[in-house]
Image (cartoon, rainbow, N blue to C red):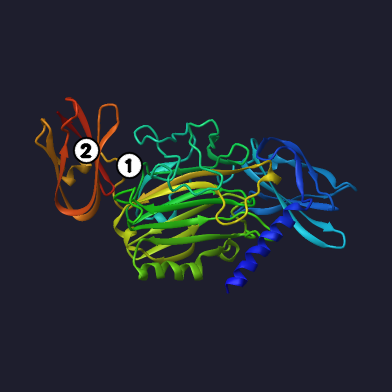
Amino acid sequence: MKKIILFSVFYLSTMHQVYSALPLIAVTSPAYCSDIQGNTIINVSAPNCTGVKIFCWKQGDGFGSNSVIDTVTLNSNGIGSFIFQADDYPHGPLTLRISGTVVIPNVASIPDNCYLQLYNKGGVLWNEGIPVNPPPAEGMNIVFSDDFNSTLKIGANSNNFTYYDHKPPYGTQDFSSIPFTSFSSSNNPFSQVDSYLRIRADATKNSAGLISSMFNNRAGINAKMPCYFECRFIAPNVPGSWPAFWLMSVPNNLSDSREAVDELDIIEAYGGEGPGKPNAKSVYAITPHAWNQSDSLTAICNNFYNALTFQDMSKHGIPSTWYETSHTYGCKITADATIYYCDNIEMARHATLPMSKIKPLFFMINLATGGGWPVDLSRYGNKMDMYVDYVRVYSSAPPTGLSLNEVSKIDVNIYPNPITSETAIHLNSPNLEDISVNICNVLGQSILSYHTLEQGEIKIPINLSGMNNGMYIAKIRVGNSQITKTIIK
């Protein structure tokens, strides 16, 4: 078996090198990932190819349809052009598929697709923006919603920003071969375009992007079961592209890699076609993980992987792929089942894992590269784009950030207060809840934190000895409820 595996890896690697060296279909103008408007001339270069056919997904009833833009006969040098009437197609991110057959005399005839990503500044408004509440969220309350139609709030401080720009804690678990980069850096991968968040992976600038709804101090957007998360986006089909929307349970200690946590990958898509690549087509991966948990829970995840992980959108009645047009990907977590959706159509389900039952979940959205596949952006000007239309979160529990009257039912008290050095937070939680306390100074700097998973009468000691006299803020989260208290020293 080992020899077979080694041979397979060698074969795929060799075929990738051979395939990548071929004179494939390319676009010489406009530039990949550029903006267009109105009638646009597209210039194509495809040596050893006599002609190409061009497709683009078009608005219409239901899912819309795959339209043929043109069929172009190339000259003896493999050069040709066509006019793309962009005003007849959807506003926003578009992907043109340019298909042909590359002929290597006396060797092979190889089908090839070139995917031209563009942003249509004109065009027809179609399926953009946040729709009405989705059926999977029936009976739930909205916890969070972002249409990305205002200035992006991405950074490292939970007091000032909505999203963290790395995988917590502190990016130590970042995984992209082209590294995730901070919003504040010179090679920032994030942009707000109309009502979209654009995440760009750029090999030249050595940057890719991830946003997390949880920060290094465990603050941020989350929801407890029963809950529903969804995100709508279009992603690039480029060799090595690895776009994803996924959830993780909030750990008690972010720095403890041994802690039991759940990971729910709502969509992991792998770009690239041809020998030695994942042959994306309309397939993407859904994958649960029960990290640092029992063998029986690991078996649930392994059984799901073997039977249900790779889902073909076309077999569920969805005619377009994840890279041809935008789709909505969702996950509903109940006490009994975790259910995955695409465009409100159930794709797969499994028994809800224990951590997902008792811990809040946070989301991440990323355009990474790698995932075990060769990465090669060279055909596409060394860059590719993911456009996120919106993200939103629902839960049957009250949303995070409730008013003081609403969360006063938790019965949180701090005494003594004022203090000389020590005090305690007292609360009563009838249910097993994830509880966190973050003590900040008036500048918003965290000076003390505490995490626990408890129920009943709870006492959390606070020691401010060594701190200057003055006012301190205690941010107390019990499950999905949050309250802020003042401590005077």
Residue most extreme to the bottom? 1
Q: Residue at x 65, y 40 (%)?
A: 33
Residue most extreme to the right? 76
Quadrant (top left/top right/bottom left/bottom right) for the N terminus:
bottom right
Q: Earlier in the sequence, mark 2 or mark 1?
A: 1
The quadrant in which residue 112 appears is: bottom right
| Image: 321 above or below 481 | below
Query: Which residue is identified by label 1?
Result: 219
The quadrant in which residue 299 appears is: bottom left
Query: Which residue is identified by label 2?
Result: 404
In this rendered view, identify the residue nearer to me: 26 or 465: 465
Q: Amino acid at mark 2?
A: Leu
The percent position of residue 310, horizontal first and vertical second, equals: 54, 64
Q: Residue at x 56, y 43 (%)?
A: 387
**Callout 2 secondary element:** helix
In this rendered view, identify the residue nearer to me: 59 or 247: 247
Circle count: 2
In this rendered view, identify the residue nearer to me: 292 or 393: 292
Side of 175 where 221 appears, left or right:
left
Q: Residue at x 69, y 35 (%)?
A: 37
Q: Amino acid at mark 1?
A: Ala
Q: Which mark is residue 479?
A: none
The percent position of residue 356, horizontal first and vertical second, equals: 34, 58
The percent position of residue 169, horizontal first and vertical second, equals: 38, 44
- Residue 265 in view: yes
Q: How crowded is the residue under tag 1: few (<14 C-alpha within 10 Å), some, or many (20+)?
A: some
Quadrant (top left/top right/bottom left/bottom right) for the C terminus:
top left
C-alpha span from label 2 to label 1: 18 Å
The percent position of residue 64, horizontal first and vertical second, equals: 63, 53
**Callout 1 secondary element:** loop
